[in-house]
Amino acid sequence: MNSHYLALSSLITLFFFLTILTPSYCTAVERFVECSIPFDCGRIKNISYPFLGGDRPDYCGFPEFKLGCRGDEYPIISFEELEFRVLNINQSHLIMTIARLDLLNGPCPSTPKFVNTTLDFNNFDYQPTDQNLTLFYDCPSEVSGLDGAKNFSCGLDNTANYFVNESFTGIDELFEKCHRHIRVPVLGSTALINESLGLQKVLNQGFDVDYHNSWAITCLGCGASGGICGFNSSSHPFVCLCRDGDQQPLFCSSKYACSFLFSLLD
């Protein structure tokens, strides 16, 4: 009789706890599961916090780190009006390699965006090894003092196009004579553009940017406690999502409510 009574009492207690679990608890558990899923696109895989996108909802990372996936082939990230192909993400050193999407098929597409490359400098910055190339379009066919400048073709009659690195001494002449220009960062090792490499290959190799994650150390602590790092739109943007459905500002407790609930059945 006593054993039956204890079993019935345990079931009643379990039912009581399950009925008072709020929808927010279930949602929190779902968030833990969803934010455990990495971002995968093409050959770029296992990308986690602070990035979101793909199967990672908005609460899994910061909105400034939202990634898209173009045709299931490669990731993209946007800064203002420009889109960039993501070539690599080094999560250990917080470095991304990106390339302007509008220049990947040629330095002068049919509808180029004649705007300089810009970043979200609150969260990203250039690597010290990056160097700028300036591409000049619609220049006179003959411009004096351009020894060392290299030209490229856009198929326009009676005009010339040049690209130079930031150390080129005649750059002011090009700014004066050419109608349009854009500034594009490239990897410092390729900035001098040797003849065997060529402009297009240099543009396709992109450039490196640091990304700032002020919550990186906090995220390590969250992960060590069994949690998953997430995003909260409130004044405290970091949240540690716990396996038991709890959400903590720093790290998870070592004791989980689910363990307690199921222990009642033992």
Image (cartoon, helix red, strand yellow):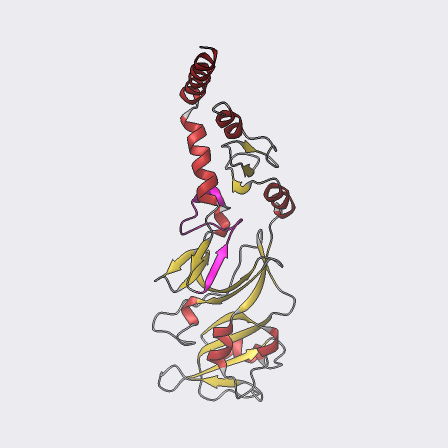
Question: In this view of the protein, can residue 82 be seen by the observer?
Answer: no
In front of the other: 124 or 159: 124
Q: Which quadrant of the figure has residue 193?
A: bottom right
Q: Is residue 57 magenta?
A: yes
The x, y position of residue 81, in whole percent, is 43, 58
The x, y position of residue 8, in whole percent, is 42, 15
Q: Is residue 184 above or below residue 9?
A: below
Range of the magenta residues?
43-60
Residue at position x 59%, y 30% in the image: 255
- Prevailing secondary structure of the magenta residues: loop
Question: In this view of the protein, can residue 88 be seen by the observer?
Answer: yes
In front of the other: 262 or 227: 262
Q: Which quadrant of the figure has residue 165?
A: bottom right
Residue at position x 38%, y 65% in the image: 73
**Horizontal placement of 219 versus 87: left or right?**
right
In front of the other: 250 or 181: 250
Q: Is residue 254 magenta?
A: no
Picture quarter with the N terminus: top left
The x, y position of residue 93, in whole percent, is 62, 59
The x, y position of residue 215, in whole percent, is 61, 45
Q: How many numbered discs sit on the rendered protein?
A: 0
